[in-house]
Amino acid sequence: MNRPSVFTRAAVFGTAVLALSALTACASAPQGTSGAGTASAGGAYTWWDPYPQHDASSAWAKRVDSCGRQAGVTIERTAYDTTALTNQALLAGQEGNAPDVILLDNPAVSTLADAGMLAPMADFGLDTSRFDKNLIAAGELDGKTYGIPIGANTLALYYNKKILDEAGVDPASIKDWASLGAALEKVKAAGAKPITFAAIGTEEGSFQFLPWFWGAGAQLTQLDSPQAVEALTLWTEWVKSGIAPNSVISNSQNTTWEEFLTGEFAFAENGTWQINSAAQADFPTGVVQIPGKDGGAAATPTGGEFITVPVQQDTARYAATKKILECMTTPEGLVETGTTFAYYIPSTAEGQEQILAKEPSLQPWVDAVRSAKGRTSDNLGTDYPPISEALWTAVQKALSGAASPADALKQAQAQAKQATGD
Amino acid sequence: MTSLRTETVAVRRETRPAAPRNRARRWTAVAFLAPLIVYLLVFYAYPLYRNIELSVHDYTPRAFVQGDPEFTGLENYRDILADGTFLRALRSTAVFTLASIAAQYAIGLALAVFFHRHFRLAATLRAMFLVPWLLPLIVSASTWSWMLNSENGIVNAALQAFGIGQINWLTSPDTSLLAVTIANVWLGVPFNLVILYAGLQNIPAELYEAAGLDGAGAWQRFRRITLPLLRPVSLITLLLGLIYTLKVVDIIWIMTRGGPADASTTLAIWSYREAFGTGQPDFSPAAAVGNLLILIAFVAGLAHVRLQRREEAG
């Protein structure tokens, strides 16, 4: 009885020691390889992106690999989630070991460019003129371009065709706020829930509010203009009168989408990335562009990642980097990225034509992307994040009834002014 | 303590030729202490120093990367104290913390006394009360926010059955602080239950028997025996509860992000939001708010030590 237990103990101990040493070996291995990589310019290239949902075996990872192979290097890809990525990038910049390529959410580009972390595209002679002006604007700071959009997404109104048919609403009739309001009232009268959106107190809240804000004719430089008040009043009235549920105040875009998928809502404001999910819904869906107040499509904010190149001490590495960037942004490359993700609209006219030839149903989205606007454009750059924070706070205040739309926006303008120092 | 003292005396009594051995022994002592000291320096002293350093500079993202922040002295602290959010956040922190620990302690003590009576299934039931502790916070916080959802939440559905109209738990500035406090109380009860239950087991059963013979009722036994003898345990439970609750970020962040309109923004949430909650990290004011929190917890700790000393003396 005693003996086996001693043996077992010894075995357990032995295994533990072995496991430990194996662990330490694993832990030290990557350091060794990355050290070697920095030493010789031809070795491993480091690549960060915000797509942890695409693992090493995904189509996206394979595409990154193949672009690396074409440039004659091996790419080591690491995925973080969006907010963690910006913080990681700042830390790496501080320690001077930034990766060769980072795919950044577009509002973060000007922040990192302003920090002096990114190399301008002109430095490696990359031609940026073929990209849509409205899309690449988010990568521009003081006349220099610090990144290229690998694709773009934006917002529109998805609708539930079943509910609209029952309520007798023709989606084509929605041309301005008045006709949208009439459609929502009709849906409400028919007993369905009219609309849902995300007004959460984060960047997503500002992102969703901007089409209405810009659609009313307001500017981010003047948060308390009468036009801005009109836009916020529109949302506030919707929540007050029950046209939109009260939960929009804490809804993220994903939650909103889940609400829409229940089939109870007639409209949902959401983005290009839900195209596949909408096609698989239990009910027929369609898309209309978000209308401006007095007609026409409202400018919607562009979303999507920019491919950026952090400054390297060893400038010899840029040659391969340039090849990788070109591989990712040829028209074919953009279409491939677009279809890989199922939600990206190419960022060049040529790419857009090619993806439309393949999938004509993307037409409303291509239109929306063409009329879209970067959040950091108008040379707002690094002023955008504090302005956006003030804006989503105002939206939260007005919708929750803590302040009237006019007062909430007045406070927001004061807050933004103080934060941006003008 | 005593063994250490005798040792020094013994060392002193040794004669001169033994001095090198003495020194060697001291080096051995240092060598044994070194890992602990290095650990303390790396994981406690340095982060604290860094936090203070962040708070007295103006760390913009640019300065953070370039490593050339402007020294601003106490300006960050002055800005924070002058900010309208500060008083609100301080008040919310006080309400959230005090309400949480009071309710956690009361419920935890009630349950501990209840389970102390050893009935059948007591152990199983007690184990079930520990579930909130075992669940990952992201799970419990998300579950709470679903339950408290204005339109589809189960809480509102239950209230509606009793004819109470829709309460916008998480989306009204009047109730969001209450909603996150309720969730936090639920999370903290198991901790209080476990410690107080352990404390109860240290109270000798004879005392209760004697009191019973003297004709003390249940309430009197609780008031005259349980409460006074549980005092030291209660004090440490409340202090730990205070420190844990002061720095709660996750549950509030997941449920309301401190909103709507800052209604559930505590100091910890404010600090987190400045640093990580927006597109542009503001590390310096965030660090300054964090330091204020450390200060508050430190003062509470001092008060605890003082109370304990008085107790030991008296």
Image (cartoon, rainbow, N blue to C red):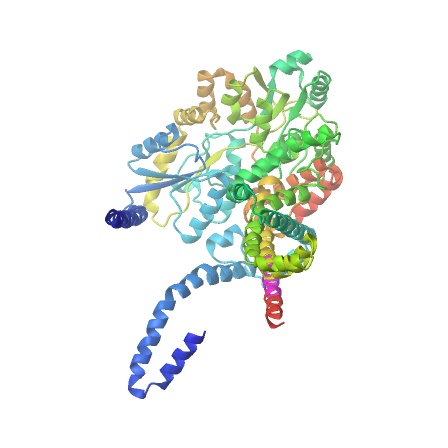
* Residue A221 visible (yes or no): no
Q: At x 60% / y 52%, what residue is drawn?
A: B245
Q: Between A367 and B302, which is closer to the camera in this rendering?
A: B302
Q: Between B197 and A63, which is closer to the camera in this rendering?
A: B197
| Residue at the extreme front | B213
Residue A380, picture quadrant: top right
Q: At x 54% / y 50%, what residue is drawn?
A: B194
Residue A275, image x, y percentages = 51, 22
* Residue A114 visible (yes or no): yes
Say if B75 sits above or below A195 in the image.
below
Q: Is residue A26 magenta?
A: no
| Residue stretch rendered in magenta on the structure | B292-304
Residue A8, image x, y percentages = 26, 47
Main SS, magenta region, reads helix
Residue B160, image x, y percentages = 72, 29
Say if A29 sits above or below B53 in the image.
above
| Residue at the extreme bottom | B16
Q: Is residue A326 left or right of residue B255?
A: left
Q: At x 65% / y 59%, what residue is drawn?
A: B211
Q: Is residue B295 magenta?
A: yes
Residue A315, image x, y percentages = 34, 46
Say if B44 sits above or below A175 in the image.
below
Label tally? 0
Q: Between B153 and A95, which is closer to the camera in this rendering?
A: B153
